[in-house]
Image (tube, helix red, strand yellow):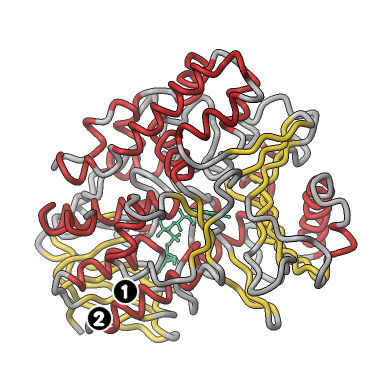
Amino acid sequence: MKFDAVILGSGLGGLECGFILSKCGMNVCVLEKNAALGGCLQSFRRGKDEFDTGFHYVGALGKGQILEKIFSHLGLMDLPWHQLDTDGFDQVFFKDKSYLQANGYERFADQLSASFPRCRERLKSYSSFLEKVGKGIAKPILEDKEGFYTFNSLFEQSAYKYLSDTLRNKLLTDIVSASSLKLELCSESLPLYTFAQINSSFIQSAWKLKGRGSLIADTLAEGIRKMGGTVLSRAEVVSLEEKDGRICGATILHNGSSEKIEGNLFVSGLSPQLTLELLKDSPNIRPIFRRRINSLEQTCGFFTVNLKLKEGRIPYLNRNIYYYSPETDSVWDIALNTEKKPVCGILISQQVPQSGSFATQMDILTPMSFSEVSRWKDTIPNHRGEEYRAFKAKKAEECIALAQNCFPNLSDAVEACYTSTPLTYLNYTGAVKGTAYGIRKDFKDPTRTLLTPKTPFQNLFFTGQNLNLHGILGVSLTSLLTCSEILGKETVVPFLE
Ligand SMILES: Cc1cc2nc3c(=O)[nH]c(=O)nc-3n(C[C@H](O)[C@H](O)[C@H](O)COP(=O)(O)OP(=O)(O)OC[C@H]3O[C@@H](n4cnc5c(N)ncnc54)[C@H](O)[C@@H]3O)c2cc1C
């Protein structure tokens, strides 16, 4: 079988690239190792219930906002999107006080100014800055062929230093950062670009799906198939073959048997480390490039508690909650070395109920370092032993105990509880060390930690969260960047209009 484009992995990045290249007339084949499509977007079923994994909410999906424009072209705007409360899409509990974060740059600043009246002007300049950064999000694709990496100076600035210098109030710095478990708040490395773009998108508008997150993956796959493309699940790429300095084929294990898929160009939505492993003995990859890729650090993983709730017990709140234990000194760096501390910060996200005003499911997430689970890394899922089960049960208890501070009847309302760790992600998506957000970008070393879609092979491209920005919005922009590298920016500009 020979295709115009072969896509490795059916995560959001792989599927979006597959969709865009199909729409541009290419005969595409997407290869996914798992039975379920979507990578971090896949949902899992327990009895009649479906739970989400790496999708809880997205920003910038309002009319005319950037993700709405991209998703319209990808056929994703007909999904059952549900907007979160515009007066408080996120609620932060820090040092026993609660703060609501509102949509709209001015309203966001005004609302927090009520708690920090002396910081009103500083908050205004912070939110105007986010607005300006957000407006420029598509600029690299629209204007600069060389991409973000070289020209965006915000990648070279520290997010933590910017916030400390601009807000000049430690508590306020914590409050505007506290809803950022959707990125890794590492004060020593987090670039201002990452912090500003992601927070800016949610201040524009915040949305959940009224249904499972895997609807996104299923819709993209259906779109690719309708345009004549092929999407294969249970098709693990085990090696890439090269000829005359180009990639010419992928060997896959498809439903257990070995097959060869040929193509003119290849896009990898796998992490760059995994991609290079598929080219183990390639003379075209210089050792220095391999060393660079393999030395890159990963952002933290997550421990997730998926709760099925008894009917009519917990009211549905149309917002996400970030709760920190009263002893938490700062929301920054809590994701580092989690093995050395108790759970102190959690994100609580309820699934939008299909009907009625009570929640039927609640997810509680807390950052988790890989070192907490590394001793079980050579065990097989579902057979990791009693010690692992006990470790997860204790963590789940800690998470639920913290969440009880927001929902006092929670323990009694739990009908069933399922958990996952960074090992789960390592096993299912191949995420290096179970990372949630891919490679840790470092403002001190942007040229080393920021990768472009280009690889040592002219017809092999990277895509996905390991490049410029993670999350649904970040990966969507990266997909356009990768396709722009392949087809030229004129072809992808319409996806931004
Ligand atoms: C717990 C958690 C919560 C999150 N919550 C949110 C959120 O609320 N909002 C948000 O915007 N973002 C969220 N994210 C981030 C978001 O899910 C990711 O940034 C995004 O989905 C990553 O997509 P990707 O395509 O880069 O990678 P992935 O989803 O990791 O896709 C890689 C794919 O490649 C496949 N693969 C690997 N090896 C092979 C092989 N050899 N052959 C074939 N296929 C292979 C994998 O199975 C997988 O399907 C969350 C992430 C996590 C982990």
Residue located at (34% from left, 43% from top): 468
Q: Residues within 10 Å of mark 1 (few under 14, many from 20)?
A: many
Q: Are marks 1 and 2 in contact (CB under 8 Å)?
A: yes
Relative depth, front residue between 495 and 119: 119
Dot label at residue 229? 2
Up/down of 358 relative to 465, above or below: below
The image quadrant of residue 130 is top left
The residue under label 2 is which amino acid type? Gly
Residue located at (72% from left, 32% from top): 94
Residue labelled with disc 1: 30
Up/down of 196 relative to 289, above or below: above
Residue located at (45% from left, 69% from top): 38
The residue under label 1 is which amino acid type? Val
The image quadrant of residue 344 is top right
Relative depth, front residue between 222 and 116: 116
> At which x and y percent is residue 343?
75, 41
The mark nearer the N terminus, 1 or 2, is: 1
> What secondary structure is found at the residue carrying circle 2?
loop
Residue located at (60% from left, 28% from top): 112
> At which x and y percent is residue 322?
67, 42
